[in-house]
Amino acid sequence: MKLVDRVYVVLDLHHPWGVNSGFIVANDGVIVIDAGWTYYSALTILGYIKAVAGDKPIKYLIWTEHHSDHIFGSIVFARERAKIIAHREAYRFLKEIGGIRGYVEYMKMRINDRYKDLVEKGYDIGSIIFEHVENVWPDILIDREYSLILGDIEFKLIPTPGHTPSNMVVYIPRYKVLFAGDTVYSRYPPNTRFSTPKLIKEWIRSLEYLSTLDIEVIVPGHGPLCGREEIERNKAILKDIIRKTK
């Protein structure tokens, strides 16, 4: 879906578990934001890119966090010679779990446990879902605001810890578009399953900072496209969680 000028979004792949993804076509290359939950999700994103951008090189893939729905399709873009940009905490997580392949084995167990009835009939659901997912590692690690310029477009990569320690958003000032990843949920409550009270407080501060930016459209990690009002809604829910925790 074309959002504005050269900014495109890919929504609802493996919804609601899969993250919303997107890509931006600059003068001399393409930037992809999040790789999708599966190898085939990533191939779908790549197909859209080729349809729009032709043979323009894919320069960068940005992970907005380390969770599987954001990174498991990364091998597709690594084979296109894209450099991967991630938060330093995402790299730390992958080192601890044994890379993406180690993460795949963990996710297979979870998926197979969820579908025990099919597993008992001989179906390895986890292997089917995560077929062809391979190890890749980030090329560029950040832990503070980072400005990336491709062609005539500037991208601001902003760490926003909260949902996980590795969250970041991609803000495109020229188009007033924010790819928020799981820092902002649209029509869903923010997922605090992986948070701590300390991280939730950081999340609130992240949202307060985002509310100061000139934003017209937000691409949330999950849910439909939205505006600035969802920043305020998410922030209110998180503040209420902190109050109840106290």
Image (tube, grey):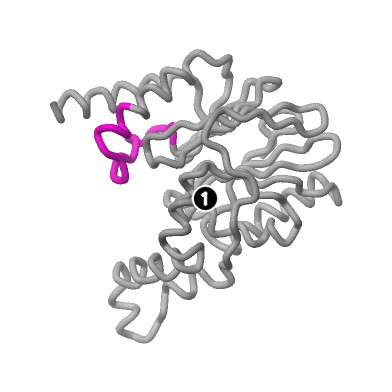
* Residue topped by disc 1: 70
Residue 194, magenta (yes or no): yes
Element carrying mark 1: helix
- Dot 1 alpha-carbon crowd within 10 angstroms: few under 14, some 14 to 19, many 20 or more: many
The residue positioned 29% from the left and 45% from the top of the image is 193
User: Who is closer to the viewer here, 186 or 103?
Assistant: 103
- Say whether residue 4 is left or right of residue 19: right
At a point 63% along the width and 41% down the height, the residue shown is 22
Q: Position of residue 60 (x, y in %)?
A: 70, 45
Q: Which residues are magenta?
A: 183-201
Q: Position of residue 149 (x, y in %)?
A: 74, 30
Determine the residue positioned at 48% across, 53% down. Answer: 69
Q: Is residue 178 left or right of residue 14?
A: right
Image quarter of the N terminus? top right
Q: Amino acid at mark 1?
A: His
Q: Quadrant of residue 183?
A: top left
Quarter of the rendering containing residue 189: top left
Q: How many marks?
A: 1
